[in-house]
Image: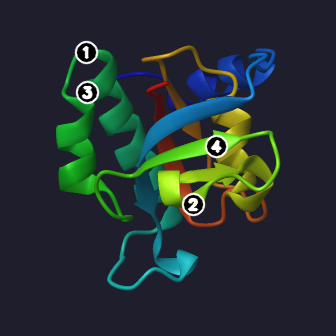
Amino acid sequence: MADLRAHIADLEKRPERKVDTIEVQHLLVAHKDAGIGGVTRSLAEAEKLTGQLLDEILKGANFDALVKKHTNDQHPGIYGMTMKGGGDRARNIYPRSGMVAAFGDVGWRLDVNEIGVAPYHPQKSPYGFHIIKRTK
């Protein structure tokens, strides 16, 4: 199984990419204290499931299919983020500052089609773990 914590630590060491706008797809693995209805898993169970899903993805599993099956957000979970101004909600592009901080922190460190994980953090990622794929 992929070492989730090592994966996160390696990604955090990378510099952010020098682009103004990115697009990501994410799979949210929430925990029961995140305030999302119907989620009963503990934080430890969420971390374990995130590691298992990351392992499947790194072995070639279809990311979109896993998002559809496992996300605690809405499928397809695709969002654009920009460093420029207020974004364009009509085109599903949001200002980086308007998203969960860890989302951008991971998204801007990824290359297109690469996967990264934003770990649970009370301020930066309060809903749980985000498995993020940069799509553009």
> Which residue lies under the disc numbered 2?
89
Disc 4 crowd rating (10 Å Cα; few below 14, some 14-19, many 20+) is many
Please tell me which residue is depicted at 63% across the width and 29% down the height of the picture.
Answer: 8
Disc 2 crowd rating (10 Å Cα; few below 14, some 14-19, many 20+) is few
Disc 1 crowd rating (10 Å Cα; few below 14, some 14-19, many 20+) is few
Judged by depth in the image, the label closer to the viewer, 3 or 4, is 4
Q: Marks 3/4: CA distance?
A: 26 Å
* Front position in the image: 37 or 75: 75
Q: Quadrant location of residue 10?
A: top right
| In the displayed structure image, the side of residue 20 where residue 39 appears, left or right | left
Q: Is residue 59 above or below residue 77?
A: above
Residues tagged 3 and 1 counted as in contact (Cβ below 8 A): yes
> Which residue lies under the disc numbered 4?
81
Label 2 amino acid? Arg
Residues tagged 4 and 1 counted as in contact (Cβ below 8 A): no
For marks 3 and 4 on the same chain, the one whose residue lies earlier in the sequence: 3
Q: Marks 2/3: CA distance?
A: 32 Å
Label 1 amino acid? Lys
Q: Secondary structure at mark 3?
A: helix
Residues tagged 3 and 4 counted as in contact (Cβ below 8 A): no
> Which residue lies under the disc numbered 1?
59
| In the displayed structure image, the side of residue 95 where residue 39 appears, left or right | left
Q: Secondary structure at mark 1?
A: loop
